[in-house]
Amino acid sequence: MFFATQHKKIVLASPHGALAHAVRCFSIGSHLFEKGFRIFVIGVKDSALLNWAQSNYAEVVAETFPISTIGGGCTGIFRSRLDFYSNENPFDEFAELERILNNIQPDVVLSDAHPLMALVCEKLKISHVSLASASWTKYYTHNRPPSNWDWMGQLLGTPFKQVIRRLATLYFNKKLVGWADPLNQVAAVYGLKKRSTVLEYVEGNDMTLITDIPEFGPLKNPLENVKYCGPIYWHPPFNSHDLIKLLNNEKKAIYVSLGSNRDFSLLANIASWLLASDYQVVMTLPKVSLLPHDLVENSDLITAELINVLDILPLCEAAIFHGGIGTLYQVLACGKPSVILPFHIEHFWNGNRLEQMGLGYVLHRRLISKDRFISVLTKAINNRQMRRSIEKISSKITNTSGAKRAAELIRDEITDPRPHGL
């Protein structure tokens, strides 16, 4: 099979700047490189995807192609929605992507939540595989209420929360239809297939790989070409043994990370609340100087710009994090309860799903206070049923190699002589 894929070309593409998307693409790309594929990368300028290509995978990447127009740069709120092209001209980006792919002549494109790529690959008749979390597909079993309404439900209580989520979900479903309009305009001009919602543009033309376990991301009546590959999360190529040496065995440690959502005032509050409650804190932080001086001087606060979570988390009692899917699977893999402080819409979906499964608690940042925060954290740490549930899920995650499975499915897709799009 190695010889069948020797010199095959694959393009990795994502409009997102976040680390989680780079991890997913390159974890799969590394396996495909070992199988004889040549790796090309298309991404936003200065994105994690291109940065990783140049600094961590330079020896396996044949060439990179920075694009400045992709999804408006997908910064800020664009990463939490799929209305990339509502205020942008998708035709210019379509033409640029078409030019790049014509230049590379790939055998397959692997995109990560890239709505426009489905149309480009359809026009060029290139095999197209897409990575997607279950919640970003039309087959997802659960509701997807917008996050900016959810705090009212938490404040008013469960009955109001359920009503608000139903209304919010109806509103969001209409948005999904509207966000497909700019892409459908491109489809109409080029005589390509129109989609009813933007979620259908996230799907791969030939295959959609679901980067979840079915328990966390259940699907209803998916098509045959929608397949679970399993979670793909970062396994850092370094250790954090130096940080482990700083841990005080007589104190419970809490891991804290807000991902790329750099709300330093919130991080400072969390650190001070935890330290005042006699916890030790291990925090992912770009610069410790961003915190108040009295916190920096506290020996029970341990910070680093990059931390091997898989080293540190097993020694912690719980995790405080933003709800990002990469960190979420790291936390579950290590078997730890968590408190989720969501920042955008997908974080809320992930947090709500964890709460539904009895694996963690969501605390809205608008409602946060020291007493409420410590109360929810204590409840998570002391919830024995939650720990038992997490242990069951943890074994399923650690026994699944999502990247390896995805690479096998992509290799099989390339060696399958079926027409594209079937």
Image (cartoon, helix red, strand yellow):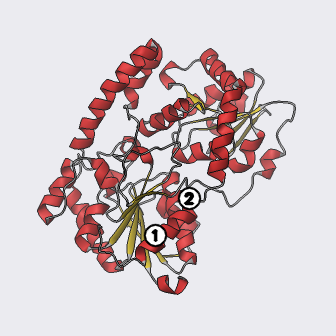
Question: From the viewer's perspective, is residue 387 above or below residue 311?
Answer: above
Mark 2 Cα within 10 Å, few/some/many (few <14, many 20+)?
many
Residue at x-position 27% and y-position 30%: 171
Q: Is residue 373 visible?
A: yes
Residue at x-position 38% and y-position 61%: 225
Q: Position of residue 228 (x, y in %)?
A: 48, 55
Residue 278 located left or right of residue 83: right
**Sooner in the amino-acid sequence: mark 2 or mark 1:** 2
Residue at x-position 63% and y-position 27%: 270
Could you say which disc has been placed on residue 402 in the image?
A: 2
Q: Residue 392, located in which quarter of the rendered image?
A: top right
Q: Residue 253, located in which quarter of the rendered image?
A: top right
Separation (CA) of disc 2 from disc 1: 12 Å
Question: From the viewer's perspective, is residue 418 above or below residue 133?
Answer: below
Q: Which residue is mark 1?
A: 410
Q: Quadrant of the C terminus?
A: bottom left
Question: From the viewer's perspective, is residue 76 above or below residue 33?
Answer: above
Q: Position of residue 160 (x, y in %)?
A: 39, 15
Mark 1 Cα within 10 Å, few/some/many (few <14, many 20+)?
many
> Which residue type carries mark 2?
Gly
Q: Give the camera-side residue of 199 and 272.
A: 199
Q: Give the camera-side residue of 164 and 257.
A: 164
Residue 302 located left or right of residue 54: right
Point out the residue furthest to the bottom here.
3
Q: Position of residue 177 (x, y in %)?
A: 23, 42
Point out the residue furthest to the right here.
250
User: Does dot 1 land on a helix, a strand or a loop?
Assistant: helix
> Which residue type carries mark 1?
Ile
User: Does dot 2 land on a helix, a strand or a loop?
Assistant: helix
Q: Position of residue 414 (x, y in %)?
A: 41, 76
Question: From the viewer's perspective, is residue 19 above or below residue 355?
Answer: below
